[in-house]
Image (tube, rainbow, N blue to C red):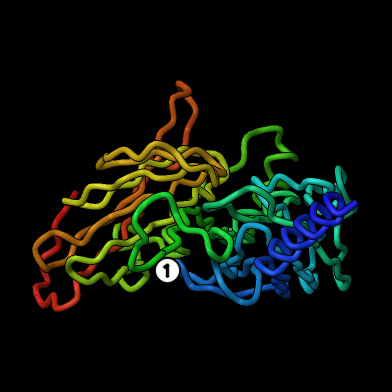
Amino acid sequence: MSRLLFLLLCASALLASSMASAAIVEHSFHVKNLTLRRLCSEQVITAVNGSLPGPTLRVREGDTLVVHVFNESPYNITIHWHGIFQKLSGWADGPNMVTQCPIIPGSSYTYRFKVIKQEGTLWWHAHVSTLRATVYGALIIRPRSGHSYPFPKPDKEVPILLGEWWNANVIDVENQALATGGAPNNSNAYTINGRPGDLYPCSQNQTYTLKVENGKTYLLRIINAALNNQLFFKIANHKMTVVSIDASYTQPYITDVVVTGPGMTTDVLITADQPVGSYYMAASPYASAPGVPFDNTTTRGILIYEGSTAPLLLCL
């Protein structure tokens, strides 16, 4: 009897410890129209909480994520938690007309699920029509309290979301393709954290910048939020150490370029170990299907060292 009591006490202690290290993380998403100026003109898009990309969600392994979605847009909407295992919570997965009916305009829905045995970078996006072109954001899963990364802790973590931009309403783009039986029009630009970069018209001031300090190490959480294209990503003169792919740790390896498929995430460590200055980062597409047109352009951002005064940018 005493042995049974001992085992029960041990089990209770383990359960209490597990519950103590977990939390309920709660957010609200307000999905509505947003007017942005890109590529020389204004465009109305559908966005979350007035930003492109939408908010970054940060949880720890074992946490329960609760997201209240208020649809204030003119379109049906659902949110998909791309890559989450959804153990015993399949109804929270988000695919429209698969695990749920759409959230109609003027209504709301609450997603609730536990993040179990996953660490790293995932993302969330709309799962109705082509709205995921503008309704998306990062989902970062850190180790639970008391645990650490299987690599040296970085000085800072930075989400890098690679996306696309259309000079049109993305719903209209899709509807036109459905009406004609053809493929949707190609995007007009690629973006880094919602900004097209200085290679595109009227975009000199629409360039993403990342400020770094000499000697410090940064964890870049790269997310390919483009609809269909694989994207190469590179930072001039800097090596990257790949440590995780799709919220799964990998054997670290060093490279100067990474390629991500649509919906894929890659975590890399970079160290600011180059001469103080400014360095371009860039993303460009890869497409192998012969005769199929695609947006063959390049988006650029800038990595700037603290203390840099020279206007010279080191190219890729």
The reply to whether residue 77 is visible in this rendering is no
Q: Nearer the viewer, residue 231 or 258?
A: 258
Q: Position of residue 196 (x, y in %)?
A: 40, 61
Q: Position of residue 1 (x, y in %)?
A: 91, 51
Q: What element carries label 1?
A: loop
Residue hosting label 1: 40
Q: Which amino acid, by three-letter code, is at mark 1?
A: Cys
Q: Residues within 10 Å of mark 1 (few under 14, many from 20)?
A: few
Q: Where is residue 19 in the image (x, y as percent from the top left)?
A: 73, 65
Q: Position of residue 156 (x, y in %)?
A: 37, 68
Q: In which quarter of the image is residue 136?
A: bottom right
Residue at 69% over, 69% down: 20
Residue lying farthest front? 2
The reply to whether residue 288 is visible in this rendering is yes
Relative to 311, say whether 251 is above or below: above
107 displayed left or right of 242: right
Residue at 14% over, 62% down: 313
Residue at 78% over, 51% down: 94
Relative to 314, say whether 291 is above or below: above
Q: Which of 24 and 194 is in front in this view?
A: 24
Q: Which of 294 and 302 is in front in this view?
A: 302
282 displayed left or right of 190: left
Q: Which of 262 and 270 is in front in this view?
A: 270
